Image (spheres, rainbow, N blue to C red):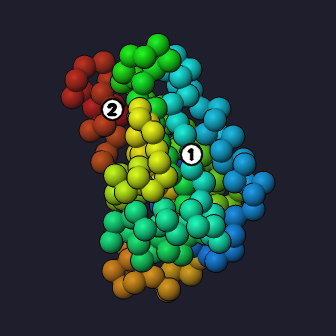
Amino acid sequence: MSEKPAATSYPVHELIRRRWSPRAFAERPVEREKIGSLLEAARWAASSRNEQPWRFLVAARGSPARERLWETLADGNKPWAAGAPLLILVCANLQSGDGSPNRLAQYDCGQAVAALTLQALELDLWVHQMAGFSVERARNTFAVPAPFEPLCVLAVGYYGDPSQLPDQRRQQEAGPRSRKPLDQLAFDGAWDAGFR
Ligand SMILES: Cc1cc2nc3c(=O)[nH]c(=O)nc-3n(C[C@H](O)[C@H](O)[C@H](O)COP(=O)(O)O)c2cc1C
């Protein structure tokens, strides 16, 4: 069940149509070369004033970091994320180069992760982003210094066998993807004038 293509009202790029957030990962490790490509894709994202506020802490299975990052996850994420061979902690630098607060840091980090996610799919890899983790535990475990802020943990890997998932997660894995209609999300020249 690795394919759950988006039902779009306008055509989009194949990678955008195919991307979704799975929970069933194969044991197969992610090649270091491919991890490098994911990070390069993120590195070349646009950012406000080219601040590049993103930082990525890579934790591949077999390393102590992988277990320590997994430990920071919320209980709802731990069981399925245990199957992901690669976890990545995403942090944002909340301070601009000139010392002022960077109000766009999280925005820019999201953009970098979006690029990483699409690059992943191009390499047959899937990404599941998780806000469900302990920010403080991640900060302490990896000695993340201020003004960096842990934002998200990414589970990354090849698609696996959904029958290995806990019951409720297996159903979710097979369930439909949904979105608000485009005309509720995009306005044509005036607020609430839904774009069609
Ligand atoms: C910033 C962010 C945080 C998320 N946190 C979690 C999480 O902690 N656990 C989880 O199972 N899914 C998490 N998700 C996945 C979303 O639930 C998912 O992207 C959304 O339901 C849309 O589904 P799709 O990505 O398959 O299209 C997160 C997604 C994002 C972008």
- Disc 1 crowd rating (10 Å Cα; few below 14, some 14-19, many 20+) is some
**In terms of depth relative to the viewer, which is nearer, 141 or 53?**
141
Residue that mark 1 sits on: 56
Q: Quadrant of the C terminus?
A: top left
x, y percent for residue 52? 55, 28
x, y percent for residue 79? 42, 77
Which residue is rendered at x = 46% and y = 44% of the image? 144
| SS for callout 2 | loop
Which residue is rendered at x = 65% and y = 44% of the image? 39
Residue that mark 2 sits on: 186
**In terms of depth relative to the viewer, which is nearer, 105 or 196?**
105
x, y percent for residue 186? 33, 32
**In terms of depth relative to the viewer, which is nearer, 58 or 3?**
58
Which residue is rendered at x = 66% and y = 40% of the image? 41
Rounded to the nearest whole Å, what is the CA distance between mark 2 and mark 1?
Answer: 32 Å
**In terms of depth relative to the viewer, which is nearer, 58 or 99?**
99
Q: Give amino acid for label 1.
A: Phe
| SS for callout 1 | strand
Q: Give amino acid for label 2.
A: Ala
- Disc 2 crowd rating (10 Å Cα; few below 14, some 14-19, many 20+) is some
Which residue is rendered at x = 40% and y = 63% of the image? 72
Q: Quadrant of residue 187?
A: top left
Q: Which mark identifies residue 25?
A: none
Tell me if residue 154 comes above or below residue 167 in the rendering.
above
